[in-house]
Image (tube, rainbow, N blue to C red):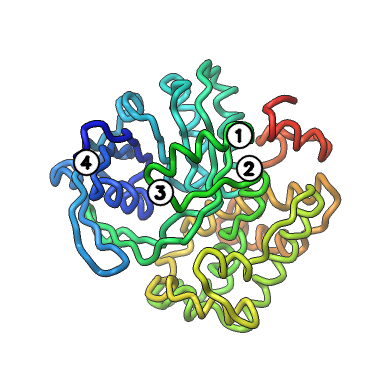
Amino acid sequence: MQQDALKITVIGAGHGGKSMAAEMAVRGFPVTLFNRTEASIEAIKLRGGIEIITEDGVGAFGPLVGATSDLGEALADARLVMVVIPASGHRDIALGAAPYLRDDQVVVLNPGRTGGALEFTAGLTHAGCTARPIICEAETFLFAARSMGPAQARIFRTKYSVPLAAMPTTRTAEAVALVQQVYPQFIPAKSVLHTSLNNMGAIFHPALTLLNAGWIERTGGDFEFYMDGVTPSTAKVLEALDRERVTVASAVGIRAQTAEEWLSRAYNAEGGSLHEAMHANQGYAGIKAPPQLRHRYIFEDVPCSLVPIAEFGHQYGVETVTMHAMVRLASIVHGKDYWREGRTMERLGIKGMSVQELHRYVDTGER
């Protein structure tokens, strides 16, 4: 392990957190893993690290500096903090981390979904945090990855590039320079509005899960989520959601990329339609469907992706009929009111702002 290497803490020991922690550790970075549930990291602590299979099929062992359920301990030495948990937990992490964060730290939400950096910043303010770390959000997660056991993970595909933005935008260059020491795939985005409204999880995850609900419950997710679950008809619903997202972004003054453009950039996958482009993406091959409907593709992506995009639409005069339908269906299936629990404009700290005021706040941090 490199003695002078950048010290990193990964928050979250799920699919993405274990994969990212192990991958960085294999390359010699000193990595500490945090998970709030001690039982989820017991095997990792006993092994002293995580076994990882990379996308080329090579196995390796990533030794960790430590694994802990104590957030203060996890953050103590870190310069870079990679938050890799469902976005529905971002506010809780902000509230819990507020007493321990420092000015010299960079916190990256992997990914932020929609409004992640805004919500995290609002959470720190609410908790009375006096430090000023750089809070960033990634547009998407760097890897297509899965946990393969209590101390094992697999990376199926690494994206070619992932836009990253800081809140405020004036600190993006500084944050990207640090993150690129570990992952050069991260590139600067124009602002957190761009990363938030180019959120492809909002398009690909909840609707595809809900539209395949019967198949998921019948088989326990024993089919390929994208290769089998994306049919010509389900792809049409995804296209309708995508049109609404792009229109909302336009109302906020942003030119958002379409889902097809994103697939081309992130995976070099192209086709004559969204259906064809998704099937051309070999990075999706082998990824199984969720084993049940109580899954982050709904409990994360509905309140933290669809709800805030629709809320942006409501605040700035865009109808989002398809998104409303998906949120309503998800609320029925889970017996929750995701409109009430989701990222509202008030929860993001931007309720009532004009487009000009919103951009000034995002770019400078000034209201």
Q: Quadrant of the N terminus?
A: top left
Place residue 318 in its image quadrant. Answer: bottom right
Rendered view: 111 above or below 8: below
Secondary structure under the numbered disc 4 in the rendered image: loop
Circle 3 is placed at which residue position?
A: 183
Circle 2 is placed at which residue position?
A: 192
Q: Which one is closest to the eye, mark 2 or mark 3?
A: 3
Could you give the CA–CA distance between mark 4 and mark 3, rounded to whole angstroms?
18 Å
Give the image location of residue 47, x and y in percent. 14, 46
Give the image location of residue 187, x and y in percent. 53, 49
Q: Amino acid at mark 2?
A: Val
Residue nearest the viewer, comparing 356 with 302: 356
Give the image location of residue 277, x and y in percent. 57, 77
Q: Which mark is residue 64?
A: 4
Circle 1 is placed at which residue position?
A: 167
- Decide if residue 297 is on the left or right side of residue 318: left
- Decide if residue 128 is on the left or right side of residue 65: right
Q: Is residue 337 visible?
A: no
First along the sequence among labels 2 and 1: 1
